[in-house]
Image (spheres, coloured by chain):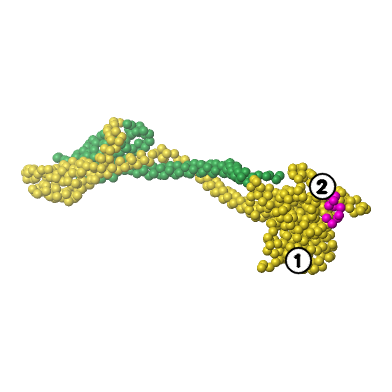
């Protein structure tokens, strides 16, 4: 068919055809490809996010374990607040298990009320003792190097008036506890 | 004075070949020689008898094997016009076939500012057959035209401005007649009238009647169709030499025919060379006369084929380029998608293989544990421990000095009470503790002279102070302010 068409109309037809071809190309090829590309990108992001989350979890776990190990050197750890009633007993037991404990003559050993600090609990033991200065020194040294850590808060030592070379006095030793899980009491 | 040149016109009229040699000078065109070769074998001799050698040559083929058309085209460049005419000829000409030679001439512009183009065509094979008569002759390369155009040129050259507005030219030859009607410079009717219907065995003039009738019908049809009348009928060719023809035509058409005449064409014999003269006039090129239709028929198929081939090659090149680009883009896209898919699969496999641990280990929150550890460190790290203080007091105090009581506080320091055998013992003890650099401040609270076990001694009290942990306290205060809580006892 010999189609007679004016140059102006031919131009319009040409541009229209070009536009139509481009539109069809976009709708049939580019748009589906873009959608598929976006879908792949989303899948990749999800997978990478999951990997990052797991990596963060692992890092957190390692950090938690390291910190926990460090923490166990400094304080007794308890899984819940309800287990804190064991703290004083465990601290008394810890003091009594020190080797130099038997070198001093403890006349009175008394637990003190548990105190709640911001991020830990503090327990105390009041100790009335007598003995040689050397034994006391060894005991103090062992207390200060004990694990979990103990701290001599206050101490009063006086010379025994009756027996030369002996001292007597009293001290307050602090121990510490941390609750690992659950809510702390307010 | 400019040197004159010679141009030759050749008319192939059946078996005859008519030649007209014209001399072209500055002001005029003059026929200097005419010749007729009744057979092609006579042609070389005739050519050699020419008084002058022509510098250009135009040959005309009869209209029997050709056609004339007027094309109405939009204005365009000459180069584009050739292409457009070649393409238009495909549909405008009745001669379907590959062996067609065409030529065109722009007659002028129409009232609608479009180009009025005269399209002329001739069958290539008969035209080439007739041109072969000139092969081997000492003549320049011929340009090809058709007899009707040659007649137009002859009339224009001979009559010029005196030509009637609407006139007809009837060329009568033995092979047939050719009727051409001109409206100004435009050929509006061009027809070949066959004389084959002449019954054999007659006087030889039986063809005149049918020819007159045929011409009359054609002219009447033309007049009826166009609403115009023919002002004059010109006669040329071999026909005017027939005595009855003029009279019969005059009677049939009610129009007195006139011979195509002019310089060198003053008689009926001269009118035989009208076509050859028209060709020679065209071959003369630029001269003082009115402008003529200059044509050279060439095979348009070659042009069209070349054009089509070029277009096909161009299209192929574009298609190849587009295909290459598409393939490259496709490959790149596929490669990108492949890489991305592999990346996604790897990441998904990796993510699938990784175990989910949960928050912390066993629900531990590292940040909270860290805070607890930091706070414990601040609390547990004392500057001077009790054992260290005891050791310092035992080792550093002077020998004449002994302690009676030690009060230790991890935060504030120590208060010691003791005795000395010498009065400067307390100061010595103070200096010794200062030298030890354990405490921030060592002050002697008092020194008293006493009698113990009948021995004169000097009792004293030293206060060894530790500066409070400002940083710890500030931090604790800040935290307490932030949370609204402070450390408080909780009985368990």
> Relative to B277, is A142 on the left or the right?
left
Chain represented in yellow: B
> Relative to B464, is A8 on the left or the right?
right
| Towards the viewer: A74 or B451 | A74
Residue B126 visible from this viewpoint: no
Q: Position of residue B10 (x, y in %)?
A: 77, 61
Q: Position of residue B9 (x, y in %)?
A: 76, 61
| Towards the viewer: B153 or A127 | B153
Q: Quadrant of residue B36?
A: bottom right
At 41% from the left and 44% from the top, the residue drawn is A59
Q: Give the mark nearest the N terminus, 1 or 2.
A: 1
Q: Quadrant of the C terminus of chain B?
A: top left
Report the residue marked by disc 1: B139
Q: Position of residue B418 (x, y in %)?
A: 13, 44
Q: How many labels, in total?
A: 2
In reply to whether residue B242 is colored magenta, the answer given is yes
Question: Which range is magenta?
Answer: B240-253
| Towards the viewer: A48 or B265 | B265
User: Disc 1: which chain?
Assistant: B
Q: Callout 2: few (<14), some (14-19), or many (20+) C-alpha neighbours within 10 Å?
A: some
At 81% from the left and 45% from the top, the residue drawn is B217
Q: Secondary structure at mark 1?
A: loop
Chain represented in green: A
Q: Please give the label number shown on residue B253.
A: 2
At 37% from the left and 37% from the top, the residue drawn is A180
Q: Is residue A183 above or below residue B65?
A: above
Q: Position of residue A169 (x, y in %)?
A: 19, 39
Q: Is residue B32 above or below residue B458?
A: below
| Towards the viewer: B274 or B102 | B274
Q: Secondary structure at mark 2?
A: helix
């Amino acid at each position: 068919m010999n189609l007679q068409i004016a140059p102006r109309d031919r131009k319009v037809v040409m541009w229209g055809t070009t536009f139509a071809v481009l539109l069809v190309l976009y709708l049939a090829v580019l748009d589906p490809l873009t959608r598929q590309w976006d879908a792949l990108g989303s899948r990749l992001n999800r997978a990478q996010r999951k990997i990052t989350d797991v990596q963060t979890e692992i890092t957190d776990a390692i950090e938690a374990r390291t910190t926990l190990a460090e923490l166990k050197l400094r304080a007794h750890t308890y899984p819940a607040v309800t287990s804190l009633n064991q703290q004083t007993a465990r601290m008394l037991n810890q003091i009594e298990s020190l080797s130099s404990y038997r070198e001093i003559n403890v006349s009175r050993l008394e637990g003190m009320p548990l105190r709640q600090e911001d991020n830990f609990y503090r327990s105390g033991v009041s100790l009335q003792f007598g003995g040689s200065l050397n034994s006391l020194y060894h005991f103090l040294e062992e207390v200060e190097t004990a694990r979990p850590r103990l701290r001599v808060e206050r101490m009063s030592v006086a010379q025994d008036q009756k027996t030369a070379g002996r001292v007597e006095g009293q001290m307050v030793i602090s121990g510490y506890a941390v609750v690992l899980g659950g809510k702390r009491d307010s | 004075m400019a040197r004159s040149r010679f141009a030759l016109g050749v008319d192939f009229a059946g078996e005859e070949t008519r030649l007209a040699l014209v001399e072209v000078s500055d002001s005029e065109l003059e026929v200097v020689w005419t010749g007729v070769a009744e057979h092609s074998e006579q042609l070389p001799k005739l050519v050699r008898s020419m008084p002058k050698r022509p510098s250009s040559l135009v040959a005309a083929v009869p209209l029997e094997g050709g056609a004339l058309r007027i094309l109405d085209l939009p204005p365009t460049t000459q180069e584009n016009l050739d292409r457009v005419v070649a393409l238009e000829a495909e549909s405008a000409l009745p001669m379907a076939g590959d062996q067609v030679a065409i030529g065109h001439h722009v007659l002028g512009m129409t009232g609608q500012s479009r180009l009025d183009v005269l399209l002329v065509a001739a069958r290539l094979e008969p035209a080439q057959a007739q041109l072969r008569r000139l092969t081997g002759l000492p003549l320049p390369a011929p340009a090809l035209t058709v007899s009707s155009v040659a007649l137009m040129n002859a009339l224009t050259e001979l009559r010029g401005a005196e030509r009637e507005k609407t006139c007809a030219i009837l060329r009568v030859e033995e092979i047939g007649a050719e009727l051409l009607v001109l409206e100004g410079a435009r050929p509006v009717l061009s027809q070949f009238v066959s004389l084959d219907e002449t019954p054999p065995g007659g006087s030889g003039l039986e063809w005149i009647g049918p020819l007159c009738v045929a011409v009359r019908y054609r002219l009447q049809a033309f007049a009826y169709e166009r609403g115009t009348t023919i002002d004059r009928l010109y006669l040329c060719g071999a026909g005017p030499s027939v005595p009855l023809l003029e009279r019969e035509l005059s009677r049939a058409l009610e129009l007195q025919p006139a011979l195509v005449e002019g310089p060198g064409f003053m008689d009926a014999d001269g009118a035989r060379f009208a076509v050859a003269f028209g060709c020679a006039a065209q071959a003369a090129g630029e001269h003082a006369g009115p402008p003529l239709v200059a044509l050279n028929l060439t095979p348009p198929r070659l042009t069209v084929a070349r054009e089509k081939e070029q277009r096909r090659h161009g299209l192929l090149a574009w298609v190849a380029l587009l295909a290459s680009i598409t393939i490259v883009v496709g490959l790149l896209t596929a490669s990108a998608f492949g890489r991305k898919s592999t990346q996604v699969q790897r990441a998904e496999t990796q993510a699938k293989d990784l175990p989910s641990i949960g928050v912390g280990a066993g629900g531990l929150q590292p940040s909270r544990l860290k805070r607890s550890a930091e706070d414990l460190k601040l609390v547990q790290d004392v500057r001077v421990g009790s054992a260290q203080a005891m050791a310092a007091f035992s080792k550093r105090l002077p020998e004449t000095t002994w302690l009676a009581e030690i009060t230790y506080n991890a935060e504030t320091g120590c208060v010691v009470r003791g005795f000395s055998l010498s009065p400067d013992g307390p100061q010595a003890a103070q200096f010794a503790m200062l030298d030890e650099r354990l405490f921030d401040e060592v002050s002697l609270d008092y020194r008293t002279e006493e009698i113990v076990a009948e021995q004169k001694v000097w009792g004293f009290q030293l206060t060894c102070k530790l500066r409070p942990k400002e940083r710890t306290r500030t931090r604790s205060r800040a935290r307490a302010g932030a949370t609204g809580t402070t450390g408080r006892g909780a009985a368990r």
